[in-house]
Amino acid sequence: MTFGQDWGWGCDGVTAKRLMDYYIDHGGNFIDTANIYTKGHSEKIIGDHLGSSPVKRHKLVLATKFCGTLFSGEPNAGGAGRKSILFNLEQSLRRLQTDYIDLYWMHFSDEHTPIDETMRALDDCVRAGKVRYIGFSDTPAWRCTQAQMLAQMHGWSPLVALQLEYSLLERTIEHELVPMAMEMGLGITPWSPLKGGILSAKYAADGTVNGHTPARGEWVSRAINDRTNAVTAALREFAQQSHCTPSQIALAWVRSRLGVSSTIIGARTLEQLADNIKSLDVHLHPSHAAKLEELTRPDPPFPQKFLPATRAVMHGGCEINGEHAEPWPLAPRTDNERH
């Protein structure tokens, strides 16, 4: 998403190629983009660099996305319908200069398209050899479950992964999407693990950097508040104690979370990329993890907030799968208890 300057805050093509080479040289093998990133320029930058090196392309897991449109006013140019999928796949293959996509994501949930049409079209793409695996991004848990069950019932290609926003400042996926992913066998690839750079702790309390407004504008400024400032203050403190950077602490936290298989980093400079990669050597101290949990624990919605209280109603006085349930005070008393 940071390859290309068409949106006002990315890097140029030369820098993007240096970033890719540095990443690959340090063991990276998963590159994620989308048809709409920087108006299609991101895919072209990647294709211009990898298309000339079949060996390098073969070693990489290359992912891109459909659903977003590059043609305003054309209703079939975006979304998750068959026409849009097939059209955008061909355009992505052309820009990326490759014969196949390793992981093809539905970028967003499309309320206007029946999910069986989407899954059947994606299965056709896999069977045609143009796509290896499929996944969903930014889609509710019930929709993912519906799609996965249809795939299992019909023998279509199943989902293998979810791409979701996940960071210390965005943890609501832990209520529905993470448990669903674990049950369905889906790997989670978090996007914006640094919340647009906020968790690098470079922003002041008013949302500026050295007095300047962030290039990403409201995406960053609207997320800065008292809670955010408390989290970044803790990251600065823990980074100093651990001899690393706040970004590395935040990325180490994401990497440690249940179900996370690969974290998507969006570096704009070589220095940012090098810093992010070094986070692989950082492991959270238990006291730091506990404090971050205290500062960022999300308030569960219904029914997650209600269900823990039902354990006693179902299994009061018992231990099930290692979890003990307290006796239910409203249960009928046994004969011994009556006497």
Image (cartoon, rainbow, N blue to C red):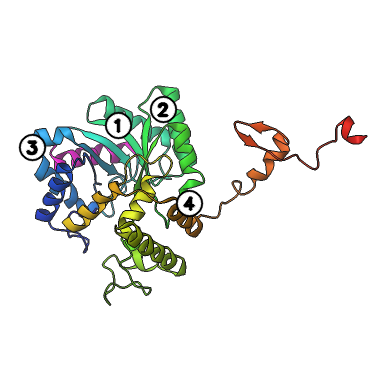
Q: How crowded is the residue under tag 4: few (<14 C-alpha within 10 Å), some, or many (20+)?
A: some
Q: Residue at x 51, y 57 (%)?
A: 294
Instruction: Please provide the residue range marked out in magenta.
Output: 81-99
Above or below residue 218? Residue 179 is above
In the picture, the disc for residue 53 is: 3
Mark 2 falls on what kind of element?
Answer: helix
Q: Nearer the viewer, residue 279 or 154?
A: 279
Sequence-wise, which precedes: disc 1 or disc 2? Answer: 1
Q: Residue under circle 1?
A: 133
Percent across and percent down for residue 92 are 20, 41
Percent across and percent down for residue 31 are 22, 43
Q: Nearer the viewer, mark 1 or mark 2?
A: 1
Q: How crowded is the residue under tag 2: few (<14 C-alpha within 10 Å), some, or many (20+)?
A: some
Magenta stretch encompasses residue 83:
yes
Q: Residue under circle 2?
A: 151
Q: Nearer the viewer, residue 120 or 311?
A: 311
Q: Nearer the viewer, residue 30 or 339?
A: 339
Q: Residue under circle 4?
A: 172
Q: Residue at x 37, y 75 (%)?
A: 206
